[in-house]
């Protein structure tokens, strides 16, 4: 019976840590995704994808569409993470 109580106490401690730490971690991740630096990095990433597609011979219109899709996919991921946090 003593082992069972110790297990329950350990579980309680783990849940307390999760309750304290996870929301702060999620908030930190969201702030990172929506920071000015994240915007700069996103712009660089989309631009690099576009240039690489053009260099690889993809027609400009297709490359532009693919770069837009890439950016929108990243935005959807960020929105999904944000919505799951609320």
Image: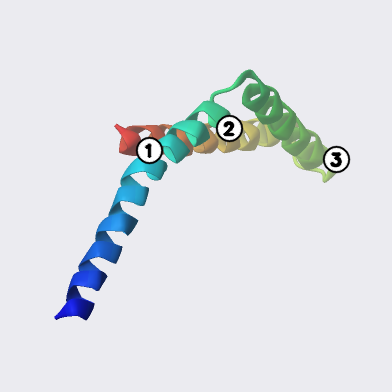
Which residue occupies the foreground of this view, 66 or 58?
66
Label count reads 3
Q: Residues within 10 Å of mark 3 (few under 14, many from 20)?
A: few
As helix, strand or loop, the secondary structure at mark 3 comes to: helix
Q: Quadrant of residue 10?
A: bottom left
Left or right of residue 25, residue 60 in this image: right
Q: Quadrant of the C terminus?
A: top left
Which residue occupies the foreground of this view, 23 or 42?
23
Q: Residue pushed farthest right? A: 55
Left or right of residue 39, residue 55 in this image: right
Mark 1 vs mark 2, foreground winner is 1
Q: Quadrant of residue 71?
A: top right
How far apart marks 3 and 1 lie (CA) works out to 43 Å
Indicate the position of residue 59 as horizontal and vertical percent values: 74, 37
Mark 3 vs mark 1, foreground winner is 1
Which residue occupies the foreground of this view, 29 or 84?
29
Indicate the position of residue 39 as horizontal and vertical percent values: 63, 23
Point 21% across, 67% down: residue: 8
Q: Name the residue that disc number 3 marks.
A: 55
Q: Earlier in the sequence, mark 1 or mark 2?
A: 1
Q: Name the residue that disc number 2 marks.
A: 71
Q: Name the residue that disc number 1 marks.
A: 23
How far apart marks 2 and 3 lie (CA) works out to 19 Å
As helix, strand or loop, the secondary structure at mark 2 comes to: helix
């Amino acid at each position: 019976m003593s082992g069972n109580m110790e297990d329950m106490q350990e579980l309680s401690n783990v849940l307390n840590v999760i309750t304290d730490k996870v929301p702060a971690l999620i908030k930190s991740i969201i702030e990172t995704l929506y920071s000015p630096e994240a915007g700069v990095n996103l712009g660089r990433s989309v631009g690099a994808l576009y240039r690489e597609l053009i260099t690889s011979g993809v027609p400009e219109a297709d490359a532009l569409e693919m770069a837009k899709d890439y950016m929108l996919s990243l935005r959807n991921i960020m929105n999904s993470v944000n919505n799951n946090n609320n």
